Amino acid sequence: MKLLLRYMNVQDIPQVVTIDRLSFDLPWSERSYAYEINEANYSHMVVLEKADEAMAARGWRRWMPHLNGRHGGGRIVGYGGLWNIMAEAHISTIAIHPDYRGRKWGEILLAGMVQRSITLQAGFVVLEVRVSNTSAQNLYRKYEFQTANLKPKYYRNNNEDAYDMRLDLGRPGLHTRFAGRLAALHASHPFDDYYSTILPPLKQVGENIS
């Protein structure tokens, strides 16, 4: 089995929407994902793809199309969204397919988006998380996110509060500690990364950004 972290493209949308609907009560629409991929210059959408054994056996040439943002043909097992606005990176969404949870694959997505934020020279990474979602909070704290404040009734489906959590990328020694966590993650769950430090594919509408 081979895992690949890469930019989301339009061919991925049906699989991504399926995971979204299985994960959240208020999923995004296909049109929303298409806008993020094609038009939003601040958006850096990512997927985690699982290749079948035949694809993985073809070697590194199997992954070359991803450098141009093309579809890989494997199964999408997770996805995430990152917005880079005014030197602040905002993790807008992150989810793993229910069939593949508990394998630390969500951590791969999180680490990839943190590294992407570092590449973009963001000052902070921010996100919202349900106050009841302690497992996600524990993962974010592992990567040194801290709770900044409480957002009352943030989630519209049940009026649950959210924690606003923030990672200060300028904290002394943060980059060194993060590099160690990322190396350990690669060692325990090998994956190829064509997202976090790679230039994104050209948008179909608008300018390309790094």
Image: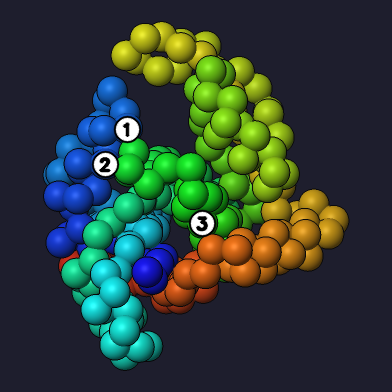
Q: Helix, strand or loop at disc 3? A: helix
* Image quadrant containing the N terminus: bottom left
Q: Position of residue 76 (x, y in %)?
A: 28, 56
Residue found at x 19% / y 50%: 15
The image's colour scheme reads rainbow
Which circle marks residue 23 in the picture? 1
Asked whether the residues under the numbered discs 3 and 1 touch, taking CB atoms below 8 Å apart as contact, a structural biologist would say: no
- Which residue is identified by label 2? 19
Q: Helix, strand or loop at disc 2? A: helix
Q: Position of residue 46 (x, y in %)?
A: 37, 58
Q: CA distance from mark 3 to mark 1?
A: 18 Å
- Which residue is identified by label 3? 108
Q: Nearer the viewer, residue 71 or 99?
A: 99
Decide if residue 38 is in sight here: no
* Image quadrant containing the C terminus: bottom left
Q: Residues within 10 Å of mark 1 (few under 14, many from 20)?
A: some
Asked whether the residues under the numbered discs 1 and 2 touch, taking CB atoms below 8 Å apart as contact, a structural biologist would say: yes
Say if 25 sits above or below 54 in the image. above
Q: Residues within 10 Å of mark 3 (few under 14, many from 20)?
A: many
Residue found at x 46% / y 12%: 160
Q: Nearer the viewer, residue 174 or 53?
A: 53
Q: Amino acid at mark 3?
A: Ile
Q: Position of residue 123 (x, y in %)?
A: 65, 53
Q: Amino acid at mark 1?
A: Ser
